Amino acid sequence: MDMLSGEQIAAAELADWRKLAQGLHARYLVDGFAAGARFVGEVAEAADALGHHPSATIGDGHVDLKLISDDAIYRDDTGAEHVVQWVTQQDLDLAQRITEIGAERGLRAEPAAVTAIELGLDAAASATVAPVWAALLTGDPGSQGLGSPSDEIRDRTGRVPNLWFGDAADGGQRFHIEVYVAPEVGPERIAAAVAAGGTVVDDSKAPWLTVIADPEGNRGVVCVDPSAVKR
């Protein structure tokens, strides 16, 4: 199934959901763990009926859900097809059904609260360092390039954040944190980091990417996808 563009996701008008990194994310507020478990049980039945399943986490007063397809088709500039992890129509269909279940139960979604963390490592030759990080992070060589046409490291079970590689032409390396938030939260998160002593060192790709440095020069990136939100 083809991967969807941000504009196609936005056209679905899924008010409860936000696209962060590769997938769709939602948070529903629930009255306790048992209520969260019942909600997840209903979601599971709907997912079984559609033959596609989310990942779910039951927390203190909330349920976090993530939807992503492991078999999305990406076509590069040459027309070659790659199987990647991304949002497809089956994710939109299930997101809509989950939204309906939440509404039937009277649950309130909190889309501005969703977030995702990824790691970035600038390296001169990702193909040479990626096997080491695949082994360290997941213990599975197959996690290198999993669901991606690049050397990105992705754990099959989601135990650790994704690790992707940037270019470091000088042979040096630097880790940084990618913080994915809902588009409406981006300016607030940046302002909070600056108020806490951080500095905006690169906003040339804002609002998609805004690089923040702490007082010692360590960097984090606030990431949003404004294309996937209906204007």
Image (cartoon, rainbow, N blue to C red):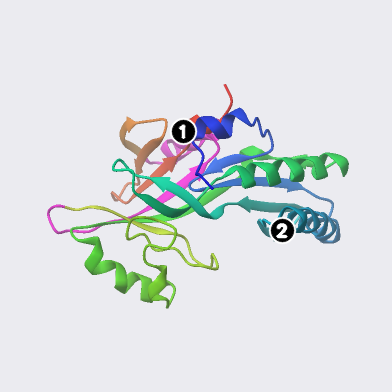
Kind of element beneath mark 2:
loop
Instruction: Give the total number of marks visible in the rendering.
Output: 2
Q: Which residue corresponds to mark 1?
A: 191
Q: Residue furthest top?
A: 231
Amino acid on which disc 1 is placed: Ala
State whether residue 130 is above or below residue 93: below
Q: CA distance from mark 2 to mark 1?
A: 27 Å
Amino acid on which disc 2 is placed: Gly
In depth, the one of 42 and 105 nearer the eye is: 42
In depth, the one of 133 and 189 nearer the eye is: 133
Say which quarter of the image contains residue 142.
Answer: bottom left
Question: Is 112 situated left or right of 48 in this image?
Answer: left
Q: Of circles 2 and 1, which is in front?
A: 2
Crowd class of label 2 (few under 14; some 14 to 19; many from 20; radius 10 Å):
some
Crowd class of label 1 (few under 14; some 14 to 19; many from 20; radius 10 Å):
few
Examine the structure image and report whether residue 197 is included in the region drawn in magenta.
yes
State whether residue 217 is above or below residue 229: below
State whether residue 36 is above or below residue 92: below
Kind of element beneath mark 1:
helix
On the image, the x and y values in percent for residue 32 come to: 83, 56
- Which is nearer the N-term, disc 2 or disc 1? 2
Examine the structure image and report whether residue 140 is included in the region drawn in magenta.
no
Identify the residue at horizontal 46%, vertical 33% (top origin).
Answer: 191
Q: Are marks 2 and 1 in contact (CB under 8 Å)?
A: no
Say which quarter of the image contains residue 122.
Answer: bottom left
On the image, the x and y values in percent for residue 181 come to: 53, 41
Q: Which residue corresponds to mark 2?
A: 59
Q: Residue furthest front?
A: 79
Question: Is 37 situated left or right of 70 in this image?
Answer: right
- Stretch of the chain drawn in magenta: 169-198
